[in-house]
Amino acid sequence: MKQSIYAPNQLIEYVYFPTDGIISLVNVTKNGGIVEAATVGNEGMVGIPVLLGGDEMVGQAIVQVAGDAVRMKADIFKREVTPDSTLHNLLLRYTLALMTSISQSVACNSLHSVKQRCCRWLLICHDRVKSDYFELNQEFLAQMLGVQRPTVSGVAITLQQAGLIRYSRGKMTICDRRSLEAACCECYGIVKQEFERLLKDGVAQKWNDGNRNGFGLEAQIQQQVNDQLEHLH
Amino acid sequence: MSAYSSTRNSVSNHLLSALPQQEYERLLPNLEPVSLSLKQVLYEPNAPIDYAYFINSGASSMLNLMQDGQTIEAATVGKEGMIGVPLLLGTTQIPLQVIVQVPGDGLRMKADVFKAEVYWGCPLHTLLLRYMQTLMNQISQTAACNRLHSVEQRCCRWLLMTQDRVELGSFPLTHEFLSYMLGVRRASVSEVAATLQRSGLIDYQRGQITISVPIELSVIFSHS
């Protein structure tokens, strides 16, 4: 937990394709405040600046739910993921979906209640871990939502009393997903719809397919760049 | 050949003016001058995108429109950028509205022409991918800013960002519009504007805002 993958404004060495863990893209302010901009799981890639040619990231990427990923050296990525490849085109579309997700967080962070935002965040995690159960530190959840820990604690108790989740000692269980969706703001649905529109066709059909990267990485990469990937544990 | 100037140096848009002359000349016949009026809607959410816009003067906003009618800005785009990143990334819509917030002018290119002419590896494409990253940085920073910072700080930030883009000491701006930009009630905006005006940092009259002391504004932004 809390492994930082990139330091701000440093050359990115690797791009990461999570296969079951979750990575948060966060902004850290001068006085230590942290707010999450986006969540990346097996639907995506961490290291978009390498794709776009910027090569560095202003914010940080930290591991939020421990798990596995495959990674590729940035220079190899640039050489192998050529513009005519399916992966390249998918990644461009993914970049736009990611932008939509961050834009929606701008609205959500300003306009919606902590309870709504917490539900959104849990649904996003639930989609990515492919399990009803995951480990989640309360302090970390507070950071992700940009609020104080007692506030998050209060929200978690409310959701638990309503039977939506079970949460104790850093272990989160999603009990009633449908009610969680009902308690959430519209932001979750808008982003999910956009991800599906942009990525659900073609090889990205593997979006809902067990412990695989949403880009259909297994099939893609074996043909293209198999030797270049390293597995992380 | 477009009637627009044939040398890139005379174009104010930073992306176009940064292109090699040859690349600029290649694209020029497909760039059509266009004036951008206040509140003009360039894109509706989830509707097909007709044109990419390169702004020369003024500024536009990418807005989240919520079901209950609330509106909040995700990003500001002026002469440093382009409106139409979905075209760059292989699609023709976006769930955001884009409207003109400060009137001005620009050059636009038809979506299908853009897709054919701005191909991977050409100088404009390379530049636009990097612009995409700056746009995402801006939006991420706004997500943090809206969560952590006061309305006064955010108002200062917005005024500075807009001034950077329009490069004018004075531009038209209504309280209503600024409240959309910041995602707060109009009353909160009026209060902040009054505070900044009393401090002598801005002058705000009849929908026209003048930034008197931009340096002090940036000090407030970072320290208050």
Image (cartoon, rainbow, N blue to C red):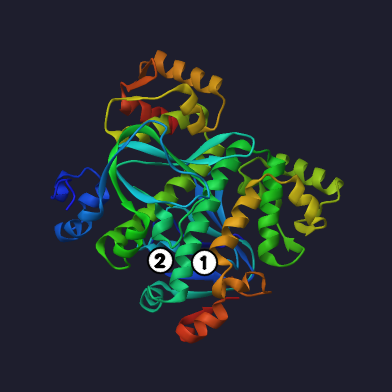
> Badge 1, how many Cα within 10 Å: few under 14, some, many 20+?
many
Callout 1: SS: loop
Q: Which amino acid, mark 2? A: Leu
Task: Identify the residue position indicated by label 1 in the image.
Answer: A45
Residue under label 2, please give it. A51
* Residue A206: quadrant of the picture: bottom right
Q: Is residue A28 above or below residue A110?
A: below
Q: Residue at x 74, y 67 (%)?
A: A131
Give the amino acid type for the residue marked by disc 1 in the picture: Met
Q: Are marks 1 and 2 in contact (CB under 8 Å)?
A: yes
Q: Position of residue A105 (x, y in %)?
A: 57, 46
- Front in this rendered view, residue B34 or A65: B34
Horizontal and vertical percent for residue A80?
39, 79
Residue B224 at least partly seen: no
Q: Quadrant of residue A128?
A: bottom right
Q: Is residue B3 left or right of residue B184?
A: left
Q: Give the camera-side residue of B104 and A83.
A: B104
Distance Cα–Cα, label 1 vs label 2? 10 Å
Which quadrant of the view contains residue B217? top left
